[in-house]
Image (cartoon, rainbow, N blue to C red):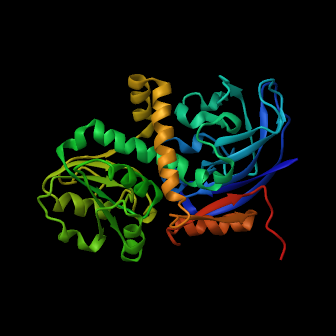
């Protein structure tokens, strides 16, 4: 058996290649999974952009200097097992390499999940090392796997951003400015914030995405990046930056004299990451990176793991019901099977092109249907 991996040049994200290697024998306690499908979104591009700074490259080391595997979220099936607690055929949801297969070292097993206790992952954030056993996962439904892969990890971040803002009383502001408003993490955050009484949610986006953002119904206003001057400069506000565009961040900080807090989430505008507006010369508050695992740790300590899970599951099902409403679904999945299709989809997402209603589901295991 062999595994095909999709590798990215760490210092040149547009440079990619496919690599196939013969599988090594499993050690006692290990399992091999077939990665059936995974989502690719701008969130994964953020993983690559911050791959060294935030250790994302360390989860699935390629073994080749300068090349990395971007972590992705999706579903896999156990095809070999030398672990007595994990059966062949079991279906899992979790964090995978962009590859056709992966090897895990399950530990700390429960009916709902287990942790990959491979030594190289021991110092990495625990939230990324957990694998959910679909048969007992309260967030899993068999008929919504594509939507789960696309939105579940992003929505959990969105839910945590909303909780973090509420936990800090919105830093005294009543207006939330969300950049890259058509992105999945942004509109998930807007969905949560929109339920907060007295909070105005303004989505910032490009002209081509205004209609889409307005159609969602979770933004009080949608404003193009070029029309920031339509928002009063003295508005007490919080900026939640999903774009990572330094020039935009600089413009926000310069215009809004009552900017109470600036939160950096990701980088959908990769070509402008860490450019002007990211450093010490920024006007107003310092741009602070939001790190979801820190809020998870805080709330699981305060609420307890069971209550944390109950609240998150309830919020997820509420969001899922809205997103998958048959009359007006927020997105549809587009499948890309096989190496060439995966490369093309990656290039499209990296370039920030495409319909915001389209979600990309990829597989290096499945081969494209013959013509």
As displayed, is residue 267 above or below residue 158?
Answer: below
Q: Residue at x 60, y 34 (%)?
A: 129
Q: Is residue 135 rendered to the left or right of residue 307?
A: right
Q: Front-most of 291 and 62?
A: 291
State which quadrant residue 102 falls in.
top right
Q: Is residue 276 visible to us here?
A: no
Classify the position of the C terminus by image quarter.
bottom right
Q: Residue at x 49, y 25 (%)?
A: 305
Residue 90 is situated, as x and y percent measured from the top left of the image, at 77, 37
Q: Is residue 128 visible to us here?
A: yes
Residue 39 is situated, as x and y percent measured from the top left of the image, at 61, 55
Q: Residue at x 41, y 33 (%)?
A: 294
- Residue found at the far right of this picture: 1
Residue 78 is situated, as x and y percent measured from the top left of the image, at 79, 39
Q: Front-most of 214 and 249?
A: 214
Q: Front-most of 364 and 91?
A: 91
Number of numbered discs: 0
As displayed, is residue 190 above or below residue 169?
Answer: below
Q: Is residue 108 rendered to the left or right of residue 267?
A: right
Residue 174 is situated, as x and y percent measured from the top left of the image, at 20, 50
State which quadrant residue 268 falls in.
bottom left
Q: Is residue 17 rendered to the left or right of residue 369?
A: left
């Amino acid at each position: 058996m062999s595994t095909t991996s999709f590798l990215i040049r760490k210092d040149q994200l547009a440079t990619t290649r496919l690599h196939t290697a013969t599988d090594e024998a499993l050690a006692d306690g290990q399992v091999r999974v077939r990665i059936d499908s995974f989502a690719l979104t701008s969130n994964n591009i953020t993983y690559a952009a911050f791959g060294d700074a935030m250790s994302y490259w360390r989860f699935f080391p390629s073994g080749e200097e300068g090349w990395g595997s971007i972590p992705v979220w999706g579903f896999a099936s156990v095809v070999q097992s030398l672990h007595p607690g994990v059966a062949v055929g079991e279906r899992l949801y979790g964090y995978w390499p962009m590859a056709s297969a992966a090897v895990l070292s399950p530990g700390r097993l429960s009916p709902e999940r287990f942790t990959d206790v491979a030594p190289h992952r021991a110092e990495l954030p625990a939230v990324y090392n957990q694998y959910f056993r679909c048969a007992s996962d309260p967030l899993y439904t068999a008929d919504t796997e594509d939507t789960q892969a696309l939105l579940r990890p992003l929505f959990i971040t969105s839910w945590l951003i909303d909780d973090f803002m509420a936990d800090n009383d919105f830093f005294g502001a009543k207006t939330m400015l969300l950049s890259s408003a058509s992105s999945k993490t942004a509109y998930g955050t807007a969905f949560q914030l929109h339920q907060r009484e007295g909070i105005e949610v303004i989505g910032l986006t490009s002209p081509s995405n205004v209609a889409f953002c307005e159609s969602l119904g979770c933004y009080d206003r949608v404003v193009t990046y070029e029309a920031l001057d339509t928002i009063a400069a003295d508005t007490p506000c919080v900026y939640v930056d999903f774009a990572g565009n330094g020039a935009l961040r600089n413009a926000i900080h310069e215009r809004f004299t009552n900017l109470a807090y600036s939160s950096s989430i990701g980088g959908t505008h990769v070509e402008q990451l860490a450019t002007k507006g990211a450093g010490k010369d920024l006007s107003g508050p310092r741009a602070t990176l939001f790190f979801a695992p820190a809020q998870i740790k805080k709330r699981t300590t305060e609420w307890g793991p069971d209550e944390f899970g109950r609240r998150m599951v309830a919020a997820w099902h509420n969001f899922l019901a809205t997103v998958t409403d048959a009359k007006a679904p927020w997105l549809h999945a587009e499948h890309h099977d096989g190496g060439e299709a995966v490369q093309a989809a990656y290039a499209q997402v990296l370039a920030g092109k495409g319909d915001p209603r389209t979600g990309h589901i990829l597989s290096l295991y499945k081969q494209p249907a013959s013509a």
